[in-house]
Image (spheres, rainbow, N blue to C red):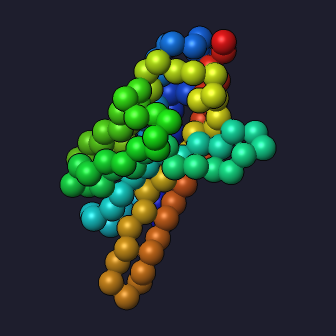
């Protein structure tokens, strides 16, 4: 089993910064991707940013230039540095880890979510 523990959410004024962290533990396949999703009230969950264990990153257009995803492979930890926050960034942020293994196929695990609220 795999566990993901998130931290770093909170309340911040527009223009401020927050840093989210997510530590994964358990039976983790070495070749994996980690990422952050968010879900605002009444909206679908969307991918914010992802990073492979090789360091390849992907961002949703709305956060490019403001958010930076990084990871520490030795600690199985992913970070999301969020700068120049906007009220529309308000959401519950979920950490995700996923991989594809021969024969066993695709696996994905989620954190419990952390609230990020940006006031105007």
Q: Residue furthest right?
A: 42
Residue 41 lies, with reference to residue 12, above or below; the image says below
Q: Residue at x 31, y 39 (%)?
A: 70
- Position in image of residue 60 (x %, y %): 46, 44
Q: Residue at x 75, y 39 (%)?
A: 41
Residue 86 lies, with reference to residue 57, above or below; the image says above
Question: Left or right: where does residue 39 sit relative to residue 57?
Answer: right
Given residues 110 and 59, the one toward you in this image is 59
Q: Residue furthest bottom?
A: 103
Quarter-wise, where is residue 72 in the image?
top left
Task: Tell me, yes or no, if residue 75 can be seen here.
Answer: no
Given residues 84 and 32, the one toward you in this image is 84
Q: Residue at x 42, y 81 (%)?
A: 105
Question: Left or right: where does residue 24 sit relative to residue 43?
Answer: left
- Position in image of residue 29 (x %, y %): 32, 66
Residue 53 lies, with reference to residue 5, above or below; the image says below
Quarter-wise, where is residue 12 in the image?
top right
Q: Residue at x 23, y 49 (%)?
A: 55
Q: Quadrant of the C terminus?
A: top right
- Position in image of residue 90 (x %, y %): 64, 29
- Position in image of residue 10 (x %, y %): 59, 22
Task: Tell me, yes or no, if residue 40 can be seen here.
Answer: yes
């Amino acid at each position: 089993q795999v566990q993901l523990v998130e931290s770093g959410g909170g309340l911040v004024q527009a223009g401020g910064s927050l840093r989210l962290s997510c530590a994964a533990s358990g039976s983790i396949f070495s070749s994996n991707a980690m990422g952050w999703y968010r879900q605002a009230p009444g909206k679908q969950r969307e991918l914010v940013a992802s990073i492979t264990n090789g360091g390849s990153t992907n961002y949703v257009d709305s956060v490019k230039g403001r958010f930076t995803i990084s990871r520490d492979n030795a600690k199985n930890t992913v970070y999301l540095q969020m700068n120049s926050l906007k009220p529309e960034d308000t959401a519950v942020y979920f950490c995700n880890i996923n991989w594809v293994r021969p024969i066993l196929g695709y696996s994905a695990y989620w954190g419990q979510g952390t609230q990020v609220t940006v006031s105007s």
